[in-house]
Image (cartoon, rainbow, N blue to C red):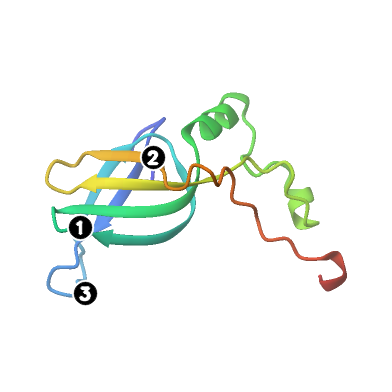
Amino acid sequence: GFKQAGFSTIDLLSRADGCRTSPDVRSLVLDPYHPVHFGNAWETENGCLEIVGCCWSPQSVEASARVGASILGSWANIVNGDFTDVAAQGLVRFSLDLASGSISCCSACPQLGHIDHIKVHPARS
């Protein structure tokens, strides 16, 4: 979610007491990452929450925003299966300290570099 201009939030829903009609939501502010998919999340014994996701970096998000461009590039190209203009994404690990509300971010797999989009062979589309 977005809490203020130039920042993103990770919104946490309380799982206490099962499902609620009015869930307790806690929003933690971080740099403007733009997640595509979250792959996994787990709680650690020391009270932290670890989340791994495929994200556009703050640099990609800010560069696109400066020129008013889409991080997806041309929608017409995407519809035709061409993802070459889509900004690169990496696998990011977010470590949330639930007691202090602090978040640290790092590359979950630095040697990976970029997660590519699934492409459908033109003969199969």
Badge 1 marks a residue whose secondary structure is: loop
Amino acid at circle 2:
Cys
**Is the residue 14 above or below the residue 63 in the image?**
below
Front-lying residue, 44 or 83:
44
Specify the quadrant of the image occupied by residue 105.
Answer: top left
Q: Which residue is mark 1?
A: 44
Amino acid at circle 1:
Thr
Q: Which mark is residue 106?
A: 2
Question: Which numbered disc, 2 or 3, marks the residue closer to the eye?
Answer: 2
Residue at coordinates 21% horizontally, 39% vertically from top-left? 102
Label 3 neighbour load within 10 Å: few <14, some 14-19, many 20+: few
Amino acid at circle 3:
Cys
Q: Which residue is mark 3?
A: 19
Mark 2 and mark 1: span between their CA atoms? 17 Å
**Tags 1 and 3 in contact by the CB under 8 Å rule?**
no
Front-lying residue, 74 or 49:
49
